[in-house]
Image (tube, rainbow, N blue to C red):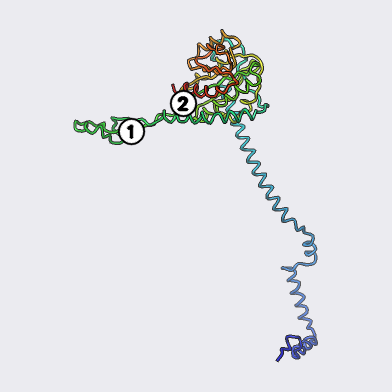
Amino acid sequence: MPDDAAFGNSGEAESETTALEDVEEDPQLAGLSMSLADEEDDEGGPDLDDVDQLEDIDPEQGEDADATETDDLLERVLADEVRDQASESRESTDEQFGEFDALQGAVEDIDAELETDGIVIPTDDVECDDDVYRKALEDSKRLARLLRNRFQKQRKRSLDRNLRRGRLDPSALHRSATGGKRLKMQRTLPEENDHHCLFVIDRSGSMNGETMATAERAMGMLVFALESVDVEVSVLELFDKQCRLAKPFAQPAQTVRNRLFNGKAQGGTPLADTLHIARERLKREQGKRFLFVVTDGTPSDPDRYMDALDRCTMPVVGVNLNDDAVTGMDCFHRQVTVDPETAELRKALRQLIQEVLFE
């Protein structure tokens, strides 16, 4: 039998609907209904004004809020980076002025008349020659491995015997029968190496061009390799008759590479004054100390220079970029003289630095 109610044909349903329509509305019920409706509007249902306001809301405001939050995060990250850079800059400045003060103190300790005005800190408004810098860094890797291996062999643990404390020494057991008490042994590690190297690089006019690039690359190879094995390194440069602080001891070479690799060369060679200053600066340090001078010939005042050299109690090593083996041969305690255009320079420097460090 078909369900007529499913098609809206139920007779009882139709009569009930008609009956409901015929019921007269009670005024009290009508007032109650209106009151309840008003309460619903006040509590949860939006009125027409609220609907108009909702229609005015931009659907992209949520996206704008997310974008604002992202921008705020980026601003905080950038602010942190700026603070870190500022902190590093302050530390770098402190290191430079600390080294500058030490050098000025060294100048005051010199008991000879200087022709220069003391120490100058160069500006950083020069560009780094990235090609020379990268070559120097690459050259340093092989030398760094050699030096690291040599230092490790030098620092092997030694065996101390005849001690009261430590491990029992089997070779001393026979002394126990006679009342011997020093039957122990200990393996000890020697103290860390304490080395300080000060480079002097000649930037006089005669070094201009390829010779300057070769000098920077040679010096850079040594500086990077020495730093990698914890040798303290500083660099002074001769530029336009000035002695300038290119790299303080406490500052990594990477942070001042624009000073070390810029190809600039100008003026004379006040090597005597710089040697006096370098000597007095190194005297303030402990451990093994030595000087490297990278130049292309003799100083401008040989007599004054030889007087300064005679006062040096630490090795003064020359890197003479000249194809004349006689030129400057008496200006250093030991030296390597190599044509700057040959490939033998790096090999000679690797040998020379090992002789200085480990003899």
Left/right placement of residue 146 relative to residue 83 reads left
Report if residue 208 is visible in the image: yes
**Mark 1 neighbour class, 10 Å CA radius: few under 14, some 14 to 19, many 20 or more:** some
The answer to whether mark 2 and mark 1 are in CB contact below 8 A is no
Q: Which residue is drawn at 62% across and 36% down?
A: 85
Q: Position of residue 270 (x, y in %)?
A: 61, 13
Image quadrant where one finds the C terminus? top left
For the image shown, how many numbered marks are present on the structure? Answer: 2
Where 171 falls versus 44 (above or below)? above
Residue in the foreground of this view, choosing between 141 and 303: 141
Question: Marks 2 and 1, Cα distance to the nearest angstrom?
Answer: 24 Å
View extreme (left): residue: 177
Q: Where is residue 48 in the image (x, y as percent from the top left)?
A: 80, 66
Q: Which of marks 2 and 1 is nearer the N terminus?
A: 1
Q: Position of residue 259 (x, y in %)?
A: 63, 25
Q: Which of 245 and 330 is in front in this view?
A: 330
Residue 206: which quarter of the image?
top right
Q: In screen coordinates, is 36 left or right of 325? A: right
Q: Quadrant of residue 185?
A: top left
As shown in the figure, which amino acid type bears the numbered disc 1? Answer: Gln
x%, y% of residue 162? 28, 30
The mark found on residue 186 in the picture is 1
In front of the other: 239 or 63: 239
Which residue is identified by label 2?
194
